[in-house]
Image: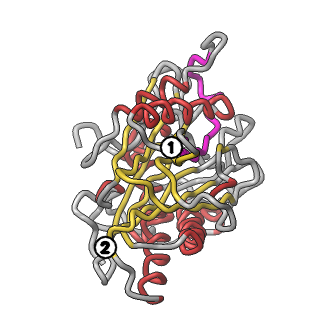
Amino acid sequence: MPNAPLNLVTDVDGVSVGHATDLELGSGVTVILFDEPAVASGTVLGGAPGGRDTALLDPSMTVQQVDAFVLSGGSAFGLDAAGGVQSGLRAIGRGFPVGPVNVPIVPQAILMDLLNGGNKDWGLHSPYQDMGYAAFLACATGPFDLGTVGAGTGATTANFKGGIGSASAVSSSGHTIGALVAVNAMGSVTIGDGPHFWAASFEEDDEFGGLGLPATVSAADRAMAIKGVRLTATTIGAVVTDAALSKADLHRLSITAHDGLARAVLPAHLPHDGDTLFAASTGKRVLAGAADLMELCHLATLVTARAIARGVHAATALPYPGAQAAWRDRWVLPNA
């Protein structure tokens, strides 16, 4: 099962990604935009989630398709970002038709990055609506940046700076699936005090350093490592495929993506995490049968785990005193 060409969620035909990044604020917004409305679902398994229009993703709800997903920093303040994306979509005539009005459907998840040292004194109104619109305008197919960008700008983990990660794969039937994740976990993405990633078993083409697993994993390595009093938690993201799946199928796909989260972060889905993963189908390719769906569920686990490791591997520290160190600050030699 090879990677798709870019090893990014934009390998899925009909998907574009845009970031808005504010290093002074220490936060940002990422938009996953669909060229055409995409069937979508999702699941929330963290104990402290924040989201907008996530209830409509339940398979029993009426609306089947979405125009975009939004991932944002800013905790509850960041929920303004979806409004900016709706403004951009409305301007181009996108949205769910309600009589003569189109209502863009833009589910959103937020992560908590308010205590990372950035300047959050923004005045009366938060900047996230404008950032959402800027991220919408920045959406493009093809390559996009990973690490300390967009919704991953202010992200942290138990021991290293978090960030935006992405990965993709192609199934044996030729379906493409990709994940994009903003990694801001209570737990740790790395094993003990070393450089190795919990997701190392799933790594492809040295995409997060090629270090493999350590020779041994001790009880100390497995001991719980979580953030302290800052509690700046929540890992959020999406898996997207070109296979034509139903809303119920995509709900299952999002659950198996959470399996990937749990294989890449230890511990995951804690009471102070808000772990939320969306799933969407562009419907470009016909699903052959049940075996195809099961393989896509399997791949959703793998691409999510790989995307999480890539997000931490690519991240750089925020540019102010006391900011959390990045993995590469400790494990990548200068000029390497």
In the image, is residue 135 above or below residue 105? Answer: above
Q: Nearer the viewer, mark 2 or mark 1?
A: 2
Secondary-structure class at tag 1: loop
- What's drawn in magenta, residue-wise? 103-120
Left or right: 34 in relation to 235? left
Front residue of 167 and 204: 167
Find numbered disc 2 in the image and state the secondary structure of the residue it sits on. strand
**Where is residue 266 shown, x and y percent of the image?**
62, 60
Residue highlighted by disc 1? 162
User: Do the residues under discs 2 and 1 have CB atoms within 8 angstroms?
Assistant: no
Tell me the quarter of the image containing the C terminus.
Answer: top left
**Residue at the image point whose x is 31% and y is 83% from the top:** 172
Q: How is the image coloured?
A: secondary structure
Q: Can residue 226 be seen at all in this image of the molecule?
A: yes
Q: Say if residue 217 shows up in the picture.
A: no
Identified by mark 1, the residue type is Gly
Q: Residues within 10 Å of mark 2 (few under 14, many from 20)?
A: many
Where does the image place residue 7, in percent across and percent down from the top left?
A: 29, 59
Question: Looking at this rendering, what residue extends furthest in the top direction?
Answer: 123
Say few, some or many: other residues with alpha carbon within 10 Å of mark 1 (under 14 / 14 to 19 / 20 or more): many
Return the mark for residue 312. none
Front-most of residues 53 and 141: 53
Q: Which residue is mark 2?
A: 170
User: What is the three-letter code of the residue carrying label 2?
Assistant: Val
Residue at point 45% right, 68% down?
214
Q: Is residue 81 magenta?
A: no
